[in-house]
Amino acid sequence: MLGRVINATGVLLHTNLGRAPIGATALDAMLEAAAASNVEYDIDRGARGSRHDHAGDLLARACGAEAGIVVNNNAAAVVLVLAALARDREVIVSRGELVEIGGGFRVPEILAETGAHLIEVGTTNRTKFTDYSRMINERTAMLLKVHASNYRMIGFTQATPVSELTGTGCLVVVDAGSGLLDERTPWLAQTPAWLRDEPGVRQCIEDGADLVTFSGDKLLGGPQAGIIVGRKALIDVVKQHPLARALRADKMTLAGLQSVACSYLDNDATAIPLWRMATTTNEELHDRAEAIIAASGLAARAHIAASEAVAGGGSLPGLTIPSVAIAIRSSNVDATLRHLRVEHRIVATARDGEVALDLRSVDPYDDATVADALRASGE
Ligand SMILES: *Cc1c(COP(=O)(O)O)cnc(C)c1O
């Protein structure tokens, strides 16, 4: 049965566990919208309105773009942009950015599906501006940059930044993937070190991208969705495309994202669980671990261990977030892990021959449940 689990893996955006947890504030908004709501109704005029007038525009404002639209997920956002703006025309992509995101989403195949013609330029490790500019002709629809979310290239590499791709007369579209709204994270007291290199949507827009697509449930921290922001004239074209209807988001998603957008507009991320998890101090995690171990009665077999959490969700590969775990000695680690999963719906991991529960991905609300489960597993 699909239902709640406790994520003690330390992977904050766990793809198999529903990626970003949705916060109470956004959930309230989703519940409000679940009944009759003005999703396609203009309250002021008492007439038909557009579902795109709510979350899309707020998210656009939150990252400094002219306009925005929300669809089912980022894969759908990319499909819609290509279908609406590049069908039967050429799309130039660096060979270093022809990525597979996972779940069968491969950039070259998606391009082919939408009827766009892929023009590969550069090499795997280096693509210069002239590699793009040489291939531009009257059939070119856009230069597409795809963030290599889930892998990292080091060494003799070169990519051409968005700021260098503008001014050719072709559209510049960025699939930013993770949905980090602003590299400077004004909604946090301090920008976490592990966010380095992750492109901000606001920065892509400032650098001159015409459109940027990103996920709602990765680093944005909202419900599953795909968001397209950018120039209003282009967003209007995208909205008119028949696929926009097929790929649209439902009223609850739109309400949840609207709430998330308002949090960002207020520069206050305390309502977004992802940022709470990401910025909890290790002292706090340590205190929680101590309390859980004491309440579980497992002090003889459990100890507190340094751990490394990760953002997950196919973002920020190789970058870890210092964290704290409860480590439990067990004569049969696999059996204990299975017991925690099946009897208590707690997903933990094996580490150094012990059972490890990383607390950074666990909501403090669930600490008592974790303690109870550990007590039961020790009996
Ligand atoms: C995650 C990701 C996608 C797919 O987004 P979904 O919201 O999972 O559909 C597409 N492109 C990039 C670069 C991504 O990181």
Image (tube, rainbow, N blue to C red):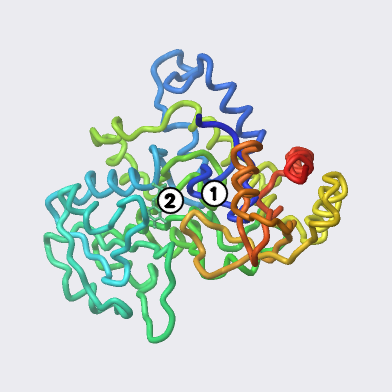
Q: Are marks 2 and 1 in contact (CB under 8 Å)?
A: yes
Front-most of residues 164 and 317: 317
Residue in view at x 52 percent, y 70 percent: 318
Residue 162 drawn above or below residue 117: below
Amino acid, disc 1: Leu
In the rendered structure, the answer to whether residue 43 lies left or right of residue 124 reads right
Residue in view at x 41 percent, y 32 percent: 249
**Place of residue 205 in the rendered image (x, y in percent of width and height, measured from the top left):** 44, 58
Check disc 2: other Cα within 10 Å, few if <14, some if 14-19, many if 20+.
many
The residue at the far bottom in this view is 156
Label 2 secondary element:
strand
Residue beneath disc 1 = 220
Amino acid, disc 2: Phe
State whether residue 57 appears in this view. yes
Mark 2–mark 1 Cα distance, whole angstroms, equals: 9 Å
The quarter of the rendered structure image containing the C terminus is: top right
Residue in view at x 30 percent, y 30 percent: 245
The residue at the far front in this view is 331
Label 1 secondary element:
loop
**Place of residue 13 in the rendered image (x, y in percent of width and height, measured from the top left):** 55, 51
Residue in view at x 73 percent, y 59 percent: 329
Residue beneath disc 2 = 214
Mark 2 and mark 1 lie on one chain; the one further toward the N terminus is 2
In the rendered structure, the answer to whether residue 79 lies left or right of residue 159 reads left
State whether residue 60 appears in this view. no
User: Which of the 4 image quadrants contains residue 163?
Assistant: bottom left
Beta carbon of the mark 2 residue lies under 8 A of ligand 1? yes
**Place of residue 348 in the rendered image (x, y in percent of width and height, measured from the top left):** 63, 51
Front-most of residues 249 and 332: 332
Residue 353 drawn above or below residue 264: below
